[in-house]
Amino acid sequence: MQCPICETRAELFGSATVLKKYQAEFCRCRSCGFLFAQDPVWLDEAYASAITASDVGLVDRNLWFAKVACSMVSVLFDADGRFLDYGGGTGLFTRLMRDRGFDWYWFDPACRNFFAQGYAADPNDGGRYDLLTAAELFEHLVDPVQVMTELRALSSNVLFTTRLLPEPPPRLDQWWYYNLEHGQHVSFYTRKSLRTLGEKFGLQLTSNGENLHLFSSKRVSEITFKLVASHPFFSLVALFRSRQSLLPADFEATTGKGK
C-alpha cells in the first residue's frame, strides 16, 4: 500500500472488526506514521446516521471549540472577516459563533443543518474565508489530500481538531479513538503526517501536540497558540474583546420580526 499523504510505502498495521461485522485492515506509513483503514467498504452503513450514538461529548466539544475559535480569531485573525465551519455537523458550532458576533457559515454534505439554517455556504461559489474550522473531521477522511485541496481553495487558514496518534501506536483494540463500533474514523495522524499534509499546500502546522491544530500560510509560534487556546485566555477575550451578538439580526432576517 502507498501512503495517501506522503506517497511512500505503508505496511499492514493490524486487523479488526468494524461495526461488529466487517473485517478491516489498517495500514501505517513507514515514513510519516499516518495510520489508515484500507478500502473502508462499510462507510455507507457507518453514515446511515451522521451523528453516532456514542458521541455523547458532541455538545461539550462544541462549547469548548467555540471558546477556542473565539480566542484564535480575536488574536490571530481579522475578527470582522468571514468564516466557515467545514463539516459543521448540526450547525451548533456555527450558531455559537454567530451568537458571539462573528460572521460564521456552515457546510456539511453528510449532516442536516439544524441550528444554522439560513447560513449554509456553497463551497463552489468562489468565495474565500479568513479561516475555516473543522472539528473532528480529519479522522473521517478517506483521502486527506483531496479534501485539503478543497479546503485550500477556500482559505489559507484551517483550525481543526483531531487526536494525534500516540507513539507507539496502540493496538486496534486498545485506543478509544479508533471507534471501531461506529466505523466513521478511518484516518489517524502523527504530527509528522499533518506537517507533511500542510506542506503539500504551502501551509505551516502549529499544534498543541494533542488535539488542536492550525494550518496557516503565516507562522504561528506554538507558545502563542497554546496560550491563546488556554482556559484563562478565554476569560480575557470574553472580558476585553467581546462583540455584539448576531442573534437579534439573524432572528429578524429569519422571521422579519425584531427581537
Image (tube, rainbow, N blue to C red):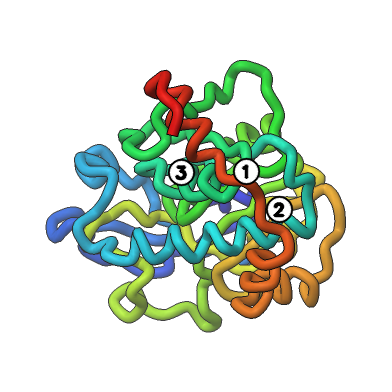
Distance from Cα at disc 3 to Cα at disc 2: 16 Å
- Residue at the far front in the pictured view: 258
Q: Nearer the viewer, residue 187 or 231?
A: 231
Q: Which residue is mark 1?
A: 102
Asked if residue 6 shows in the view, the reply is no
Percent across and percent down for residue 206 are 74, 64
Percent across and percent down for residue 209 are 64, 75
Secondary structure, mark 2, is helix
Q: Which residue is mark 2?
A: 73
> Is the residue 103 above or below the residue 37 in the image?
above
Q: Which residue is mark 3?
A: 95
Distance from Cα at disc 3 to Cα at disc 1: 10 Å
Dot label at residue 52: none
Percent across and percent down for residue 227 are 73, 76
Q: Residues within 10 Å of mark 1 (few under 14, many from 20)?
A: many
Q: Residues within 10 Å of mark 3 (few under 14, many from 20)?
A: many
Q: Nearer the viewer, residue 3 or 233?
A: 233
Mark 1 vs mark 2: in front: 1
Residue 233 position by quadrant? bottom right
Percent across and percent down for residue 191 are 65, 68
Residue contact between numbered discs 1 and 2, judged by CB atoms under 8 Å: yes
The amino acid type found where label 1 is placed reads Phe
Distance from Cα at disc 1 to Cα at disc 2: 9 Å
* Residue depicted at 57% across the width and 53% down the height: 3
